[in-house]
């Protein structure tokens, strides 16, 4: 997995069309401070072809996650929140246009470090 620096985060977010209609596939707690998120999303750089992203949140400070069986019911038609704020990487479902709404979201992860891997879409 490659480190995802805050300077590249906006570029990836825009490239993935703000995760509009993304499919959340799984959330796995690897350790008390490490969470892996797997999702399918469309990639503008590949003509909106689908790719999968593995996101490894390390040194997690706060999180609310849902069971994998419920992930498919999360509406991402308006996108998902994914940004860098106050030295933290933040991912959240719902309230995607409001950075202040993170802790009100149904699912969120806040971490100090983030790594990622692009793989073939999983259907």
Image (cartoon, rainbow, N blue to C red):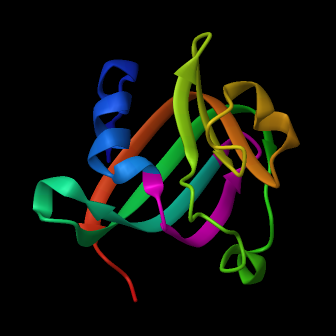
Q: Quadrant of the C terminus?
A: bottom left
Asked if residue 24 lies in the magenta stretch, the reply is: yes
Tell me: residue 42, above or below residue 79. below
Residue at the image point whose x is 32% and y is 48% from the top: 1
Residue at the image point whose x is 56% and y is 58% from the top: 37
Locate residue 61, reporting x and y percent: 75, 29
Locate residue 112, reporting x and y percent: 59, 23
Q: Residue lying at the far top in this picture: please name it.
A: 86
Q: Which residues are magenta?
A: 19-34
Residue at the image point whose x is 87% and y is 41% from the top: 104
Q: Residue lying at the far bottom in this picture: please name it.
A: 123
Q: Residue lying at the far left in this picture: please name it.
A: 46
Tell me: residue 8, above or below residue 97. above
Magenta: main secondary structure: strand
Give whichever of 113, 122 is nearer the camera. 122
Locate residue 117, reporting x and y percent: 32, 54
Residue at the image point whose x is 79% and y is 73% from the top: 67
Tell me: residue 112, above or below residue 1. above
Question: Is 36 on the left-hand or right-hand side of 32?
Answer: left
Locate residue 92, reporting x and y percent: 67, 45
Question: Is 58 on the left-hand or right-hand side of 11?
Answer: right
The image shows a total of numbered marks equal to 0
Quadrant for residue 77, please give it: bottom right
Asked if residue 71 lies in the magenta stretch, the reply is: no
Give whichever of 43, 113 is nearer the camera. 43
Quadrant for residue 87, please give it: top right
Give whichever of 29, 92 is nearer the camera. 92
Question: Is 90 on the left-hand or right-hand side of 31?
Answer: left
Tell me: residue 107, above or below residue 47. above
């Amino acid at each position: 997995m490659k480190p995802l620096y805050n300077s590249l985060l906006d570029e990836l977010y825009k490239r993935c069309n703000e995760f509009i209609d993304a499919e959340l596939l799984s959330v796995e707690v690897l350790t008390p401070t490490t969470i892996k998120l797997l999702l399918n999303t469309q990639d503008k750089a590949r003509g909106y072809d689908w790719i999968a992203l593995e996101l490894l949140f390390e040194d997690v400070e706060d999180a609310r996650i849902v069971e994998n069986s419920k992930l498919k019911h999360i509406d991402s038609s308006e996108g998902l929140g994914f940004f860098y704020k106050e030295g933290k990487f933040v991912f959240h479902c719902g309230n995607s246009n409001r950075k202040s709404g993170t802790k009100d979201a149904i699912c969120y992860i806040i971490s100090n470090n983030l790594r990622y891997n692009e793989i073939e879409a999983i259907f």
